[in-house]
Amino acid sequence: MRKLSVKTRIAVWLTLLMGLLAALLLAFLLSVSKVVAVRTAMSQLAQTVRSNLSHTAMLNGRLELGSGFDFYQDGVTTLIYSRDKALLAGQLPASFTVEEAFQNGLTRMVSAGAEQYLVLDLWLPMGWENGVWLRGVMEAPENRRLMFKLLLVALIIMPAFMASAALGSYRIAKRAFRPLDSITATAASINEAQDLSRRIGLPPGKDEFSQLAAAFDQLLQRLERSFESEKQFTADASHELRTPVSIITGACEYAERYDETGEERQETIAMIHRQADKMSQLISQLMSMTRLEQGTEPVRLERVSLDKLLRSLCGELACDPSRLVLEVPNGLTVEADPSLLARLLRNLVENGFKYGRPDGHVWISAAKEGGEVLLEVRDDGMGIPSGQQDKIWQRFYRADPARGEGGTGLGLSIVRQIAQLHGGYMTLESVPRVGSAFTLHLPAPEDAADQGSPIKFQTGKTPGGPSVS
């Protein structure tokens, strides 16, 4: 049985089940037919005897039978007895040889040798003391003959019934498993072609196969995304690590080939250290982006107080506090992952200082507008040309490579990813030689309080922020 296909096994089990149900139905019919046949015979007996009773009378001491009286009708024999149980009219069936006591109005089964009879007696009074008995006698239905006929019919019909059941069960199973065949064929073709972009594509539905196909499509989508992320990671890492590896290799070869002074050796070691740090930072950020893309770095949303988060962030940043200005309403909150939101703001602030003026400033402000909470990071740097503003979100793109030395070009890509993970998005407003403003748009919590009075936090005297609108 295990070597058979699932469809064949289901068809076999359905056929056996239908055969069992047919057998049970036959047994039920046999048992019911016996009861029905006996009750039908009893009803016919009573009806015939009562009909003859209505055509029986006594006139002038003589028994008179009407024209409707029939001694034998529909298998019922009617006999007339006197009060003293003497047979007055009618003829007993040849095999009815028992002496059966009279019981008025009671239909009963009487055995006469191997035969069984149904007997009904009715008393017809004629005067105060006189009267006659009408006895109806009828052969009981022959159950054996009926059972034999039913079994014979069953033996003739059952093979055809079982064959039809097997064929119908197989067709039903085949039709029911047709979506599974489609899933199997698509999965096999995907495996052969190694094309994870293909999908099973069953129509949406609530049945198990539609849900299975949808789960497979989701799995394929996730696998495709994982492989694409892995390919992207490999390509990015090999491309970006080529330069620092080449510098480190060249420095090592130079140190091995020539005798360096102590000062030169320290410079070589410092250069190798810088390149190693750059490689470590690059790999760390690439791994972080891959985890965000694949969803393996979970987003733990919680209610975050922006003023507390930004104050803590300002204390952690390695920058001149007098150049960083924080303006945030008191009590403004968002639903966010604190660590990811802090990473987003840290990347924006570090970019603001890196690409800003040497003595420039960075402003962080927050506000609630409509159904959004806006977090803005502004600088008074050189700005970004309009032709490059759409490209800065790409991996490894630097608007000013000369000023971005030491960076990986991944900061803004990570910023956009984090914003999308929170159901938000980023916008940029930038004017060359004036400054840039990066704004994070997040959905405002439904129960978020209205914007309170802004709190301005700075440790040094600074001018007002640039207007880039």
Image (spheres, rainbow, N blue to C red):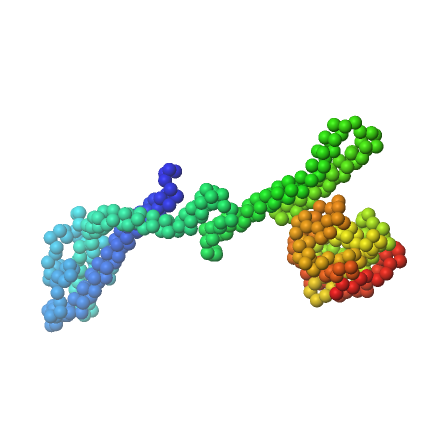
One can see residue 173 in this view: yes
From the top left corner, tell me how far across and down residue 331 is, in percent. Answer: 78, 60
Give the quadrant of residue 369: bottom right
Of the pair 451 and 2, the residue shown nearer to us: 451
In the picture, the quarter occupied by the N terminus is top left
Residue at the location (86% across, 61% down)? 463
User: Residue furthest toward the bottom?
Assistant: 60
Q: Nearer the viewer, residue 439 or 355?
A: 355
Residue 330 x/y as whole percent: 80, 61
Residue at the far front in the pictured view: 258
Position of the C terminus, as image quadrant, is bottom right
Q: How many marks?
A: 0
Q: Nearer the viewer, residue 167 or 340?
A: 340
**Residue at screen point 77% across, 57% down:** 382
Camera sees residue 21: no
From the viewer's perspective, is residue 152 above or below residue 129?
above
Q: Position of residue 448 (x, y in %)?
A: 73, 62
Q: Which one is nearer the viewer's eye here, 404 or 334?
A: 404
Residue at the spot 71% in from the left edge and 58% down from the top edge: 385
- Residue 324 lies in quadrant: bottom right
Relative placement, left or right, of 425 versus 108 is right
Residue 238 higher or lower than 26, as above or below: above
In x, y percent, where is residue 291? 64, 45
